[in-house]
Amino acid sequence: MRSVNTVLGPVPAHELGVVAVHEALLSVLPGAEHAFDISLDRAEIFETLAAKLRDFREHGGGTVVDSTGMFHGRDVPLLEALSRTSGVHIVASTGMGPEELLGGYFLTPQTNPPTPWPAEKFADLFTREITEGMVVPRVERRGAAGLVVTTATAGGMTATDESLFRGAARAARNTGVPVSIRYGADAVRELDVVLSEHVPANRVVVGGLDRRDAPAVEIARRGAYVALDHVGTEDDTHLGDKERAALVHELLDAGHGDRILLSAGAIGEAVGQPGNDVPFSRVLSTFVPLLDLSEKDVRRILVDNPRDLLTRHGK
Amino acid sequence: MSKVNTVLGTIPAEELGFVAVHEHIGYGMPGSELDTQWWKTPEQRYEETVPKLRRFHEYGGGTLVDVTGICNGRDVDYYKSLSAKTGVHIVACTGFVGGDTALPFFARASVEYLTRHFVHEITVGIGGTGSRAGVIKVGVSRGGRMTELDKRIYRAAARAALATGVPILTHLAIDAENAIAIFNEERLPLDRVLFGHADDGVNAEKTRDTWIARQGGRVGFDTFGYETELEDPPFWARPRKQRLAHFLRFIGDHLDKALASADANCSPLGWPGVKGHTVNYLFEDLIPDLRESGVDEATITTLFVDNPADFLTIRN
């Protein structure tokens, strides 16, 4: 069966429907859970997220990919309950990054000298989240991650970022799930790090390619998926929706229609960090009408491409 | 009134008794909770921990100060149950073992925010536990020099110590000039600071223990038991006789500034721990060694009862 790992188990790939591929459900800046002035009210968080997922579903959405990774507030039992309640498939992710968001366990381990973790250890950590289940820290493993995510430091990839990228790539290669990278300073070079681990380009999605300086077409030319994942956001860093729509057309015209992915980069519930007010339905409600594309192209971008990306290969 | 915050509430300093001033119920680097190789069932954790605390109590131990920082697996509800069932007073800390154990939310925070956080944990409580922190933990990151974040944490700790009257314990006493400069700038009397790990195998040579004492700081010989003679010693181990001789030299001149502890883990959280090393080293090895070296009972009482009580008492 061609299937995708969701928090409620493997789902046939053709059942995903419209996929929002780079979103965050509960997103907690590591450490914020200990802050004296922050309380995590599960019931309230659930209500907020359930409402947002219902809105997504009402707009025709089928699947949300929570691309926060394993150390940014991921709460597997909560995601399961949200999926059951809303009827939206939720694909959870493993992975971490960039370096600044890691715990000291990975950066200054209790060894002399305190050498940061190498790629192979990250690969093992991430692989087991796919083959054995995602960790609920110190309690149990549940479900299986549907993809591996990591991010490069905005100023440029650090040595540990590179270990994370290589580890994520190896985990993807080992298990057949895709790998999602958010680029830092040099998307092409950072993609090349992943590709050098012998991961086929069509198993990789590069996020953040609707930044003003992003080489979206070049990434598509290399065969990786191009995520324009800030739909609805316009700021100093990112294209506005009109320019974003023009970029979609540019990619289509260049023959890269099968590599385009769209997402809002919404943060359903942000803790310890600024959130955004973008709904998961943003692509469907506002951006698709603006795109002025055929049904077939819309379907390709919102349904077929993410389905092909997320479908677990081999193994 | 002389009082100390324990996880089960405020107690008079007179009730502390014999104090192990720098210990861990269980320590793990932040993120170690993601690595299943270290996971233990709750049954296992109690099984590893309770007999050690019970023996500590039977030997005459009164109080264990847990200096497991905010992001290192500090688990106050668990400490409460351990304390209630074993009769050992447990003092929990606020603060961080070092900048490199503070997660991004705190690593990005200002001195003002960190101060408010520490003060809240000391005066209102830690999370939803209702338990108040009795000490503030700070420390030097790996690498031997205080980082900018370490310094921010030290400054916030100094302010919180002044505002609340609880003392500060440090992880490592290297680069003490920078630490003392911050405490002086904040006008924190140095007898409110215990400069720890002056005795470990990696840092002892680099630690200006007598200089710290002459400035008025307290000095922790608090890695007793991490010995090169062990079957599988950690990298910070030191020959047993060397540490003992160092300690005896120090208390010869600065008994009033000296504190001792074992820095043991009852049940480690994110590392294998060191086989056979427990807080009870203090009773089973150190005190016999001290007696054999001619240290009298009054001195032993000063080290383990009077000095810690003076240090831990909330000063208003």
Image: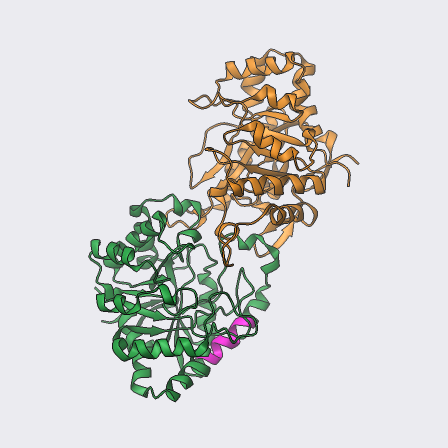
Quadrant holding the N terminus of chain B: bottom left
x, y percent for residue A71:
53, 45
In the rendered structure, does residue A213 fall within the stretch colored magenta? no
Give the quarter of the figure containing the C terminus of chain B: bottom left
Of the chain colours in the picture, the one used for chain B is green
B53 drawn magenta: yes
In the image as oriented, which residue stretches furthest toward the right? A1
Which residue is the extreme one toward the front? B205
Vertical order, B117 against A220 (above or below):
below
Instruction: Let me know if residue A88 appears in the view.
Output: no
Q: How is the image coloured?
A: by chain
Q: Is residue A43 visible?
A: yes
| Dominant secondary structure, magenta | helix
Q: Quadrant of residue B12?
A: bottom left
Q: Position of residue A119 (x, y in %)?
A: 60, 45
Residue for point 50% across, 36% down: A48
The colour assigned to chain A within the rendered structure: orange
Count of marks overlaid on the render: 0
Magenta segment: B48-56
Residue B114, how many percent across, how many down?
Answer: 33, 49
